Each structure stands twice: as C-alpha cells, then as structure tokens.
Amino acid sequence: MKYEVNYGTLAIMPNNTDDSLVYEDEQRYLVDGTPFEIMEDSCRYFGSTYEGRKESAKAILGAEYKVPIIVEDTNNLIVFPTTSPSANDCIWISLNRIRKFEPIDNQHTKIIFDNEMEIIVPSTYRSIQNQVSRATRLDYIIRKRKNPQV
C-alpha cells in the first residue's frame, strides 16, 4: 500500500525493517516502506523532493539536523523527526495535530493528539519540546512570508 502524508496523519512509526505503522485520525495502517521512504514519496507527491524540502527548512531555520519538513506547503503540513531521519528508529510526528505532550520518564514522552489518540515515543521530553519549537518556528516564518499581515 502506498501512503502520502496528509492532514489526517498523526505519526509514522517504523514497524519492521521495510514497513511502517501509520497513525491517522482513528485508524492505523501498515504501510510498505520505511518512515523515511514514506516521507520521500510524500514530498514527491506534493511536487518537491525530500532533499529540497530539507535544504529549505535548514536555510530558513539555520539548523543543521533533525529539521522539520513542510510536506505540503499550501496548508503548511509540517512533520518533524524524533531522531536522525535516516535512523531505523525515527518516528515522524505531525505538528498541527499535537494537542500536548508530557514526560513519561527520562527517555520517553507521551504525545497526545487533537483526537485524543496517544503514542509514547522513545525521546526525551526536552527533545520533543525542541522539535515542536523548531517546527512551530518554521510554520510561523512560512505563514509570515505568505501573508505579511498575519
């Protein structure tokens, strides 16, 4: 099954070496391909490349690693990685669907989405906080560029 990130996407998690578990609204899908491959396919589907989206985000934010990606720019559909995007354990989280997040312990964070679905990711609270902040900043900068009156 092919999958493109969309507004219903909550998170994309690795499942095995060559497939992923996608959380979308009230459903979960098992999708062929790693989370990184799904990200690459989604960027292409919306008319760009993952590499182009990554380089743009790096230039806008002045960041070098774990940059958020604008998958689709009409609606600022932004996702961010929990680790290095090429790592086997990288999880991609949709910024606009997060309601809140809270620490579980020193190595895990619970993310609660706007539909009340919850996932626990193997990332520190501080790391998720940094990624949400970075993705929010990217969202703000892009919105200001599109509409300076905002």
Image: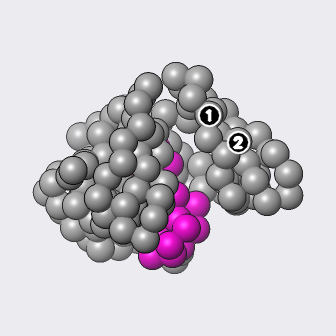
Question: Residue at coordinates 67% horizontally, 46% vertically from top-left?
Answer: 120
Asked whether residue 62 is in view, the answer is no
Q: Say which of 102 and 120 sits in front.
A: 120
Q: Which stretch is magenta?
A: 78-94
Question: Residue at coordinates 52% horizontally, 65% vertically from top-left?
Answer: 90
Question: Residue at coordinates 35% horizontally, 73% vertically from top-left?
Answer: 55
Binning the other alpha carbons within 10 Å of mark 1 as few (below 14), some (14 to 19) or many (20 upward) gives: some
Say if mark 2 contacts mark 1, CB within 8 Å. yes
Q: Secondary structure at mark 2?
A: strand
3D distance between C-alphas at marks 2 and 1: 7 Å
Left or right of 24, for residue 87: right
Quadrant of the image occupied by residue 59: bottom left
Give the farthest residue toward the right: 106
**Residue 140 x, y percent position in the rendering:** 46, 44
Left or right of 63, for residue 17: left
Image mark for residue 82: none
Q: Earlier in the sequence, mark 2 or mark 1?
A: 2
Residue 84, magenta (yes or no): yes
Amino acid under disc 1: Glu
**Residue 100 x, y percent position in the rendering:** 66, 33
Q: Say which of 62 and 28 sits in front.
A: 28
Left or right of 91, for residue 72: left
Q: Which residue is mark 2?
A: 110
Residue 142, magenta (yes or no): no
